[in-house]
Amino acid sequence: MSKHLFVFGYGYSAAALGELLIPQGWKVSGTTRRAEKAARLAENGVQALIWPGAEPDLSDVTHLLISAAPEVSPAPAPKTGGDSVLAALYSQLTTIAPALEWAGYLSTTGVYGDHQGDWVDETTPLSPATARGQARVAAEAAWQDLAAKTGMALHVFRLAGIYGPGRGPFAKVRAGRARRIVKPGQVFSRIHVEDIAQVLAASIARPRPGAIYNLCDDDPAPPQDVIAHAAQLLALPLPPEEPWDQAEMTPMARSFYAESKKVRNDLIKEELGVRLRYPDYRAGLAALLAAETSGG
């Protein structure tokens, strides 16, 4: 039987996975909201569907990936957890769920909340401090509930801050728009998009229904250190430091500083045999700059 991956929310991370699977002969389909993006996806071998819109036909899907973010609301519906896919397609998903070989839900390490710089792993209780994190907890629970009722082979992936081609700090540093905002003790975990793709592929090859995995590199670090290293790689002046409590930021940007934690990634290595291509931001930034320089 041919393999068919269907992705709700075919974005940055899903595209990296598609680039691995399509050359292997997989049929890959995904949703987008914009016609121009659907055309670009089609050029890359993806069967694109504009959605919300016509209900997708999932009858021949063998693998399902949910990459769409849930709605942020004060009281998400218990059945769907504010997840737009569940809200629109609950009945069809219930029908196809038992036959799926693998299903993945892309969540966030924001579900753990603030741990004042301490370590967390997949067993840490969920205590999100932000509305976005709370929405993710609700959506995770809704998908897990569906899996419990139907036997869906669900896997939850909690992603740290994503970077990669087109999403590195170099453009801002070059343009003089990069900021080194300093909050004492603040650390973030990160993950290169290529490592996200290889973890998802490894899970597809070794499914364990009910699994939860943290996706991050080995080196949680203060955000100002990453900007400083990018500037050094470019041989450009360091952006000045700005104290967090004095910096002008949007509410969204400020919310990222409400939580500080270091995320463990042992499980993806021990269970899935993953060896990170970019185990820290230094390796990741060096590769991004080398690709830029070579035109790759």
Image: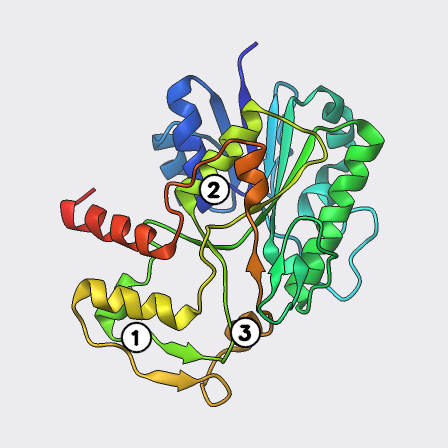
Against 70, residue 60 (above or below) is above
Neighbourhood count class around disc 2 (C-alpha, 10 Å): few under 14, some 14–19, many 20 upward? many
- Residue 71: image x %, image y %? 67, 57
Which element is circle 3 on?
A: loop
Q: Pointer 3: what residue?
A: 257
What amino acid is labelled 2 in the image?
Ile
Q: Residues within 10 Å of mark 1 (few under 14, many from 20)?
A: few
* Residue receiving disc 1: 177
Coloring basis for residues: rainbow
State the separation of the CA atoms marked 2 and 3.
Answer: 23 Å
Q: Secondary structure at mark 1?
A: loop
Q: Nearer the viewer, residue 94 or 226?
A: 226
Which corner quadrant of the image does residue 239 belong to?
A: bottom left
Where in the figure is residue 225, as x and y percent of width and height? 36, 69
Identify residue type, mark 3. Answer: Tyr
Residue 214 vs 252, above or below: the answer is above
Q: CA distance from mark 1 to mark 2?
A: 28 Å
Q: Residue at x 17, y 45 (%)?
A: 295
Closer to the camera in the image, 290 or 79: 290
Which is more N-terminal, label 3 or label 2? 2
Which residue is labeled 2 in the image? 196
- Quadrant of the image for the C terminus? top left
Seen in the image, is 94 located left or right of residue 48? right
**Viewer-nearest of labels 1 and 2?**
2
